[in-house]
Amino acid sequence: MIKTNLLLCVMAFLCSWQQAQAQRTEKAEGLGDIIEYASPGVRNMGKPRGIVIGYERLPQFDIESTSTDPTVGNGSNRVRRNNLFDVRALAPILNRPQTKLILGFGYNFEEYNFSNLPANYSLYQNLEDKNLKSIGLQLAYLHSLDDRRFYLIRVKGELNGDYTNDNISIIDYLKTTVDVAYGWKLNPDLSWGVGAQLGYTFGRRRVLPGVLYNRTFNDKWGIESIFPANLRLRHNANEKTLLYVGYRLEGASYNLYLNEPPLSPFGQVELRRTDIKALVRMEREIYDFLWFSVEAGFRQYYRNRIFDEIGSTNELIDNDLAGTGYIGVELYAVPPRKWVEKRP
């Protein structure tokens, strides 16, 4: 599953790690001046995450499917639950005051369970209890040009779909995403930038422009955003508790092998989805390097469609999914406090 919060995770890691570790000062070569290199991070942002384990669940919601192909027809059902599991890991392989190189790994899967199976509609039979998996590897590069300017490049590759160890094909399932951004650090409480993502936020691969805006107003309040993909208002309740409210735009593209007629003659098709979440979130320290978060809100589907071939523009099925509430939890590790507070 390809989601914009993967980029958020990398950005948060880079921002916080640079804020905690890399805002060390260096003497410019041949000069006596002290340079504090620019980064996207601002004061009071959350700590960088090294390992994240997450689970999200959507309760029951209705689905109606229509197709212009008479052999496929129309169908309706009720999704009893939609589960999403997520594991991510980020680690710096280069950590210098001016340059960061972050390696990331992610694994997640999504599954649908329907209320009225066996049903008379092939799509639901093909999706029932089928794990829509994503295994990804990414590399992010953050470089500070001076004390005011920085840029970010991230390249990510994922294998997305319902593959198993028996039928996996890298060529068939590989999806790539590229993010670039250029920004300015105006002061410790304000940074902004412009950029673009070539990825699957809207299902089909396309360019999504973005504006990075991170600002801390005071010791209690701030904003973190990559508009239009996401925006969050942050409240620092205390040193160990962060509260957020905002929204997030998400998208995914899965390759599916169909084995239930009448869809089975199409062989491999592509499921593309885009949705938006209005959310509230709490992050809380459990013990030093261990944190957890609880997030809840309302998830509204914008598009959910099946295409007759991978990369095709020929729509086979248009799914209308009712909006529903959701809840998600995460457990994650951050650098121990003694690492963060350490000074060179």
Image (cartoon, rainbow, N blue to C red):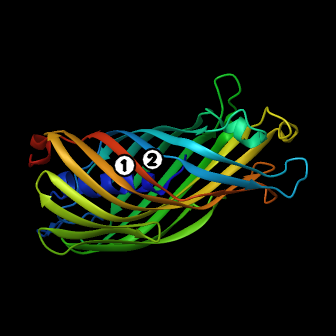
Mark 2 sits on what residue?
139
Q: Amino acid at mark 1?
A: Leu
Q: Which residue is at the front of the view, 167 or 258? A: 258
Q: Is residue 263 left or right of residue 195?
A: right
Q: Is residue 158 left or right of residue 77?
A: left
What residue is shown at x 19% (from left), y 48% (from top)?
A: 284
Query: Of helix, strand and loop, which one carries label 1?
Result: strand
Q: Which residue is at the front of the view, 287 or 96? A: 287
| Residue 191 badge | none
Q: Position of residue 326 (x, y in %)?
A: 43, 51
* Number of residues whose C-alpha sits closer than 10 Å to that of mark 2, classed few (under 14), some (14–19) or many (20 or more): many
Query: Which of the 4 image quarters holds residue 256?
Result: top right
Q: Position of residue 143 (x, y in %)?
A: 35, 60
**Answer yes or no: do the residues labelled 2 and 1 have beta carbons within 8 Å?**
yes
Mark 1 sits on what residue?
101
What residue is shown at x 61% (from left), y 52% (from top)?
A: 62
